[in-house]
Amino acid sequence: MPDELVTLTIDGVPVSVPKGTLVIEAAKQAGVLVPHYCYHPGLPVAGLCRMCLVDIEKAPKLQIACATQVAEGMVVRTQSPQAKSGRMGVLELLLINHPLDCPICDQAGECELQDFTFQEGRPATRYSPDYAKRFNPVEDFGPDVLYVPNRCILCTRCVRFMEDVAKEPVLNVSERGDRAYIGIHSEGRLDHPWAGNVVDLCPVGSLLSKDFLHKARAWELDKAASICTGCSQGCNVTLDTRENVVVRVRPRPNLEVNRYFICDHGRMNYRWMNRGDRIEAPLVRRGGGSELHATDWDEAFDVVASRLRGAGGKAVALVSPKASTEALYFARELFRGLEWSGAFQVVMGEEAPLAGVPNLALRAERAPNGRGAELLGYSRDYAAAVAAAETASVVLVLDEPDIAVRTAGALIYVGTVLPERARDAQAVLPIANVAEEEGTFVNRDGRVQRYFQAKSAPGMARPAWWVFSELVATLGGGGGGGGGGGGHVGTAAEAFDRLAASVEAFRGLSYPQLGFAGAAAPAVAVPA
Ligand code: SF4
Ligand code: SF4
Ligand code: FES
């Protein structure tokens, strides 16, 4: 049954929202952001900071928008003189003891106290310059969290996250009144596998990530929507880059996958994206020689194509479950007409659920696209594929730096770095990593999700889907055995269209349709 709708007016804009909606959420529909601190859509309502005061017609006094439900015919004014004055008073109280730390605070530039003070606060303090502000020393709360009490506005978002979402209540509000601060259990640490979310939830610079401490100012960062590669959950993330270096990973809200959170394993899983020891040019072996020579893409494609044309019988692809769906598709197309087998291996770890959110956990399977590889026909029997490689006429290795493959045939290595074993390859083709290309992953529940480019690839490295699609085109459209068709592929979107047109599990999907939130692959059952 559809939700019963309630119609109200917010700052003169009529909106209709489901019964039970909070005024602060209804205001978003009207394009109005009501200032707030303690409210967060991923946490239980606390209603304690009073920053969201609004004027509601016929109500005897100002109401808090975060704990007031909409009613039919309600008239809300966020900009009335009374509402503005109420919020200005709240800000004045919050700032009494707040230090002038902005020049050295990591939160500056993305701080809600700065933003709302600029938008709503008094132009100057009414306190004497001689007033001695409260001072408490910085505390070490856990492996990646520092607490700076002087900046704390006691919104309790961090306390509620640990208590109601992580279900590990190690934080509390200690003391009362202007002596209050966030305390940590005497034997507790903020070392829960999802504890890093308190840093994102803190609206000011009171909880800080040690990993990000003083690395960059917020306004220096470029941001790209991406998907975490840490496990098969497929959490939506933002990659923050500074001068072409990934410096921070933060959650990107997706109510279907990770709500507003990511785990600490995923948060810290980015340094490899900045590795400096990358392959920057294609390498080929000329005329049966023993050395690899750097070359251009044309010669590299010719060398690989001639090997594939001369191949017969078995071909084996050992692929990474961190490769994009598009790359895995074209890697398969390359061997059309040959006796093909493909496999991937997954590193396993401990599962760590976020207790307060159903179906959200750091998954034991530490790879983002095992499901995508399966949908494209790759098997999990990696050992059998490695054994088959010994007698195959051609073996393709995609992005597996720890390869342990022996073959009597031709080895084609496609990767970001050059492992010792890959020096036996006939050709080495340099590819972009996940931060340097566009593509899709399919998470464990069969949700197809796009990731976007965050930084440029080094040297001549190119996205793997481009490398394989060019090889397919060089071979006349259909790999070692010929056949197929379709010509060159210019963009990741076109690569995905090719895949969706020929693989049933992706039929009907396209990049515009996937957008930033993704969609379920049609042929895959997604749990409710
Ligand atoms: S540390 Fe941050 S999140 Fe926690 S109560 Fe203080 S201001 Fe709020
Ligand atoms: S649960 Fe998995 S996908 Fe989500 S942030 Fe953690 S490692 Fe990344
Ligand atoms: S946001 Fe409404 S009282 Fe804090």
Image (tube, helix red, strand yellow):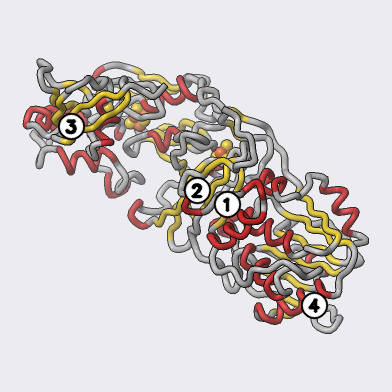
Say what amino acid the circle numbered 1 marks: Thr
| Left or right of 416 on screen, residue 255 | left
| Quarter in which the C terminus is drawn | top right
Q: Which residue is mark 1?
A: 440
User: Left or right of 429: which side holds 463?
Assistant: left
Cβ–Cβ under 8 Å for marks 1 and 2: yes
Q: How many residues crowd mark 2 within 10 Å: few (<14), some (14–19), many (20+)?
A: some
- Assign a secondary structure to mark 2: helix
Query: Mark 2 or 4 closer to N-term?
Result: 4
Residue 319 disc label = none
Q: CA distance from mark 4 to mark 1?
A: 30 Å
Residue type at mark 4: give it.
Answer: Ser
Identify the residue position indicated by label 2 in the image.
514
Q: Quadrant of ligand 2?
A: top right
Residue at 11% x, 22% y is: 57
Residue found at x 45% / y 35%: 260
Up the image or down, 222 lies above or below 361; here it is below
Mark nearest the camera among 1 and 2 is 2
| Residue underneath mark 3 | 10
Asked which secondary structure carries label 3, the reply is strand
Is label 4 within 8 A of ligand 2 (CB to nearest ligand atom)?
no
**Residue type pointed to by label 3:** Ile
Q: Residue at x 46, y 50 (%)?
A: 225
Q: From the top left corner, tell me how far across and down residue 377 is, in percent.
A: 75, 49
Rendered position, 472 above or below 159: below
Taking 370 as reference, is 330 above or below it? below
Distance of label 1 from label 2 (alpha carbons)? 9 Å
Which residue appears farthest toward the bottom when viewing the image? Answer: 287
- Can residue 49 be seen in the rendering of this structure? no
- Compute the Cα span from label 2 to label 3: 32 Å
The numbered mark at residue 306 is 4
Crowdedness of circle 1 by 10 Å Cα count: few (<14), some, many (20+)? many
